[in-house]
Image (cartoon, grey):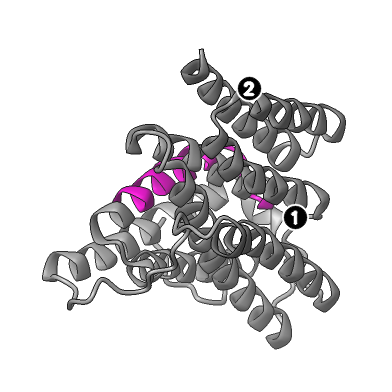
Amino acid sequence: MKSAVKYLNLVLLCLATIVLVGLHNQAAGWSILFLSGFTLILSKRDLAKDLLPLHGSIAILGLTPITTDISYGHIFEMSLALTAAVALPYLVSRYVYKNDRIVFRFHHGRRWFKREIFYIALAGVIAYLLLPFYLQNTGAYLNWPSETDFSSIVRLFIGTNGLGIWDEFFFICTVLGILRHHFTFKWANLFQAIMFSSFLYELGFTGWGPAMVFIFALTQGYIFKKTESLLYVIAIHLTVDFILFLALVNAHNPSMFNIFIT
């Protein structure tokens, strides 16, 4: 019974993330999140303790206007909210529960293998070929600001890269870090990828973007499991985000960064 309940709770938490954060349906999203929280009463104590802060993080994201607005005020507002979403489960885990569910291990204590460096380059090539096509094919680039003055470009660069780093801190280190203590890695990685995709859908990856993001999130989770290096998965993500930044600017102003063939 309790085994079924723990999967039910996780399904509800993911569904709440999709509806509240991804689709921004407040009434349905909050209802599902509260129902998910209620089912914690029926779960094992250790699982309920660990999932409760995640419910708090999703609530924070649900209250936050997650958009691609790069005005200074919005950047500040989102930065505070996203920091709180990471800090809440980390501080509760470390100082209240006194466990190591969430560990921001930047390096694995060795040099990167040649194949790991090759994979970063490969990720960049795939992003170069795929992202410009995706943005133009779906019109998703219109979800990002069109201003191409120096200040706007700098803020877009900071925003895309900052969010990329946050994704790894929250979804890979925090969500996956907690879930893999209670579920097999396969299930933990699947559910973090669903939550990852939901967040980026609201951010602007519409059309067939969620499928692309889902595959990327699954891959990032698997790579983190194999390397245990936050620095490495961030390096991969920032490589992809750099291509995204160039493709966004080019989509709005084809005379800038005109380096793409797709």
Lower sequence index among marks 1 and 2: 2
Distance from label 1 to label 2 (Cα)? 32 Å
Quarter occupied by the C terminus: bottom left
Disc 2 marks a residue whose amino acid type is: Leu
Is 211 a magenta residue?
yes
Residue 227, disc: none
Q: Residue at x 87, y 30 (%)?
A: 27
Q: Residue at x 18, y 76 (%)?
A: 110
Residue 2, image x, y percentages: 51, 19
Q: Residues within 10 Å of mark 1 (few under 14, many from 20)?
A: many
Disc 1: which residue? 66
Q: Is residue 179 left or right of residue 83?
A: left
Q: Residue at x 40, y 40 (%)?
A: 189
Disc 1 marks a residue whose amino acid type is: Ile
State the image quarter where residue 252 is shown.
bottom right
Disc 2: which residue? 42
| Location of residue 238 with respect to 97 vertically, above or below | below
Front tag of 1 and 2: 2
Q: Main secondary structure of the magenta part?
A: helix
Q: Are marks 1 and 2 in contact (CB under 8 Å)?
A: no
Q: Residue at x 48, y 47 (%)?
A: 178
Count of numbered circles on the image = 2
Residue nearest the viewer, comparing 65 with 9: 9
Q: From this viewpoint, which residue is outermost toward the left?
A: 114
Write down the region rendered in magenta: 203-222
Residue nearest the viewer, comparing 41 with 86: 41
Residue 25, image x, y percentages: 81, 33
| Location of residue 163 with respect to 112 vertically, above or below | above
Q: Residues within 10 Å of mark 2 (few under 14, many from 20)?
A: some
Q: Is residue 170 left or right of residue 13?
A: left
| Location of residue 180 with respect to 148 vertically, above or below | above
Is 157 a magenta residue?
no
